[in-house]
Amino acid sequence: MTKQDFIFSLIRSALWQQPYPHFDMTPGEYHAVMEEAEKQCVQGLIIDCLRSNNMGLQKKCVIHMMKMYNALVAENRRLNNNVAELHQLLSSHGIEYIVMKGQTLAALYPKPELRVPGDIDFYVPENDFDRAIEVINREWGQELNLNDLRTGHIEFSHHNITLELHNQMQLFHNRKVQKEFDKIVDECKKTSVSIDGKDIQTLPATLNVFYVFCHLFKHLRGAGVALRQLCDWTMVMSRHHEIIDRKVLAEWLKLSGFEQAFAAFGHIVIEKLGLPREQFPVEISERDKKWSKMILDDIIRHGNWGLYQRDLLSEMGVRHSLQRGWLICSRFLKYFWLTPKDNYSFMIYTVPRMTVHSVKTNIKRIGHRQ
């Protein structure tokens, strides 16, 4: 069994709470596994499997593991408290909102406290957006304004936790798709998930499956994603498979041009993460499967948000901007025929905007230096 296959087997055990045969791990084996797990942001799942099955670890490895365990539990508790506080703030002023991803997905895991947390993303519709900024500024001591709006969201910090206030939940390169998706979001019937004793508003099942996929695929093409994002998507489909509207989902996938990409990722989560085939909401063809190996190799090699690739320079400036621009374009070309409809729009609309933005940014940077 390869290291990759071994890690997938540990992840499957944790996702589905299945017993794992007892074995002893040397310190070298333990640290090699945890290093790869951290790269993929699934260390909580690995810890769960090792603890639940009482694996044979040396004392110093157990101490290391328990430190990581306690840190994850504490960080998830902090984020849950912040989500509950956000809910209380917005609800008390009658402001509509939707919390996306993050802690709303953690709640779907067998042990939510062990999902590796990130930041808090929430969407506020246009008619409440200005008022949300006003309330957050006044009651949380922030200084947000519309000039801070970049690529659909405003980023800020509260209790040392990053939050992103979105006026668009997901950005598409095709304008027709963007308009239709924004309409779907604003007209959807929200559901809720209990976090820290509060009913937190989030996306309904079918839209959540579509959105979580769009988000992870966007980042795969932009830089990279980790196995955690695939685990999130797997949990959404597994927990809600009985109520997912497959016909509506198929319509959205056709509209966006993501049918083949969705199926290719589906083959990965079925084969590697153990999602039962009957719980996956679309058909998978042999053609779809051919993309799976390249996608999985990309995820394993580059890790969370592509941070482990060495294609980018660390310094800022014109050279960095050109190199990053080339990286993004090359990744779109790599996956061009997986989602040709969206990629044509990227070339026609997004590349020119990116170029203009990069030029303006570097002109300002050069001006400040002078």
Image (cartoon, helix red, strand yellow):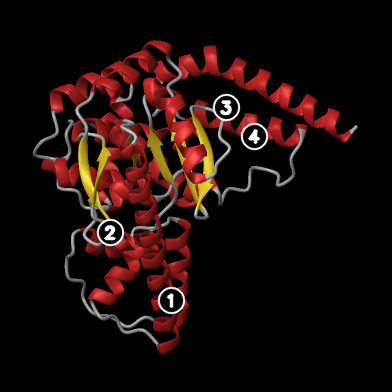
Residue 163 is left or right of residue 19, and the answer is right
- Residues at marks 3 and 4 touching, judged by CB atoms closer than 8 Å: no
Which amino acid is tagged 4?
Answer: Arg
Image quarter of the C terminus:
top right
Give the mark, 1 or 3, whose residue is nearer the N terminus: 1
Q: Quadrant of residue 267?
A: top left
Helix, strand or loop at mark 2: helix
Residue 270 in view: no
Secondary structure at badge 3 equals helix
Up-down: is 321 above or below 19?
above
Q: Residue under label 2, please give it.
A: 112
**Mark 4 against mark 2, which lies toward the viewer?**
2
* Distance Cα–Cα, label 4 vs label 2: 35 Å
Disc 3 crowd, CA 10 A, few/some/many (<14, 14-19, 20+): some
Task: Using the image, tell me which numbered label, if any, was put on residue 324.
Answer: 4
Viewer-nearest of labels 3 and 2? 2
Identify the secondary structure beneath mark 4. Answer: helix
Residue kind at label 1, given as amino acid type:
Lys
- What residue is shown with label 1? 67
